[in-house]
Image (cartoon, rainbow, N blue to C red):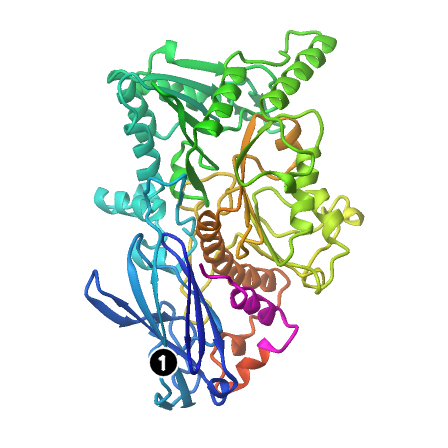
Amino acid sequence: MRFRSDSPGGSLVAVSGANTISFAVIATDQLKQGLLGFAVERIDPTANERFFMAGFKVFESVIPQPQPGVQVSTFDQPIQSFVWDDFTAKPDREYQYLFHPLKGTPKNLNRSTPPLSITVHTEPLFSNLSHDVFFNRGVASSQAYTRRFGTTPINDLKPPAKHDEALRWLSRDLDVALLRFIDHCDAGDQLLCCFYEFRYKPAVTALKAAIDRGVDVQIIIDAKVNEFTDKHGTFHPSFPRVDNLDMITEVGIPTQNIIRREARTSAIQHNKFMVRITAAGPAEVWTGSTNLSQGGISGQTNVGHWLRNPDTAEHYLQYWNELSNDPGGTDSDALAEVKRKNKAFKTAVETVSPVPADLRQVPAGATAVFSPRLKDTVLQSYSTMLDTARRQGCITLAFGIAASFKDLLVDNTPQNALIFMLLEKRDKPDPKKPETFIAINASNNVYKASGSFLRDPVYQWAKETNAGLLGLNEHVSYIHSKFMLIDPLGTDPVVVTGSANFSEPSTKENDENMLVIRGDTRVADIYLTEFNRLFNHYYFRSVVENLTAHGEPTDTASLFLTEDPTWQAKYKPGSFRAKRLQLFADITVV
């Protein structure tokens, strides 16, 4: 939801998701005079709470040597920004926020300027609308996690209640939503599932319970044989085949409810979706980036998307039917037969999922895009969508930036749209082929953050851990979500979300599904506020990591609050911060 409040000192703009709210202060010149920052106060009538929000930076003249782990309040250590986010909101709740301008000096703050006030309401977590969206926290690498649970690996946390609490905190409500989707299926319904990893026991157990109460559950799993022995002589069993089959046996799901996806061993069955079919026909879809694993639920960043749309559910049903026959070439087929079968399979997928060559032309609503496809047209279209965003584009990338994106973005200038990229790993040259590296950065209006954590105490930030060190994830520890936002603050936003990494294998080879959602500002607001949360979280950490990697000391001066109003110079016309602020200033509030 979008909100705006005007006062003599300026305007407050807020965009709310379910758990996160993004704010912008459009201050008058008079308010800016002598402004040291804002003390942000939150009033929560539901909880009968009123308090000043926590701050991160401090005035060096007030706290010259902040200790790791110290927490401060914006009451006297203000927010020196015109764009700010509250990551601690609760769903479907009304809040009032007061932004108190602080002037004077750090040791003699002047609080006489009237505050700017705004009342907001967060989105419900569960609704009867077309879309509900669920993000886990995805920030095992955080001060909040470290303060609560330390850096001990999850399985070593004691007592067991602490272990369970840590997993719940990391999952937020993603697991609750996933299980609710399964549990609300009634006897007589059909639930058609398709999963890459199938080893999160609570979900597998819930599916077994659904079978027992009379739901017709059919589950396609990745069961491809890809075992190998590496150069060191270590044997690697087929993944995720072995884990998936072991979990099925452990929980006791009957073999007649399982369909093994074994053909096309060079491509993965990467879907994570469920389709509910009632007596009235296809009704609902669960999709997103979340594998059925503990790391998918509680470790790396992930999203679950619940769609109530019979037409789209019908497309998912048709796609599931194609996959249920285990289509494509097998290892026992001759090469010509492999090519014939694979082409037939891709043609069938495109028949089920006819989309315009230019995805900018999709109609309002939700459009399903399935893979694999004969050509990389879809990937090229995703790249064009991001490159031609009018004001802003955001994307999460678990496995690097595809060349198609770089080829289009490399000629952009600061006059183009602001592009934000959230990556699992820092974008850097391949040591074996450094000459092929294409750099895109602030000169192209592209701003990148990558997964990282504080390995040592910095300023008042304590040493952290990450999802890999906690034992939750082996390969992707930070950014596993796959979504893209095009002009999310506009009146006609586009959200692309699902299982596919924005890469050539994901569009031409793997079994994948994506939703292109156009014109739904509620969906865009939820995704954008969560993107802001994750980008802001990892941006600071990736900057610190980059400095460390180059042997450069962290600029401790920049870690403190500025002691006078000169911090506002970062918002000079044409600057990155000014353009980002303008995105909020131009919001249309209906």
| Secondary structure category for the residue under label 1 | loop
Between 557 and 508, the one lying in front of the other is: 508
Residue that numbered label 1 is attached to: 115
* Type of amino acid at the residue the image marks with label 1: Pro
Image point (58%, 76%), residue name: 571
Between 513 and 561, the one lying in front of the other is: 513
Rendering coords of residue 396 (x, y %): 56, 47
Rendering coords of residue 550 (x, y %): 64, 62
Q: Is residue 122 magenta?
A: no
> Which picture quadrant has residue 121?
bottom left
Indicate whether 77 appears above or below 258: below
Image point (71%, 56%), residue name: 440
Look at the image and tell me in which quarter the C terminus lies.
Answer: bottom left
> Which picture quadrant has residue 275?
top left
Between 160 and 255, the one lying in front of the other is: 255
Span of residues in magenta = 571-590
Image point (39%, 76%), residue name: 66
For the view shown, which residue lies furthest in the left direction? 48
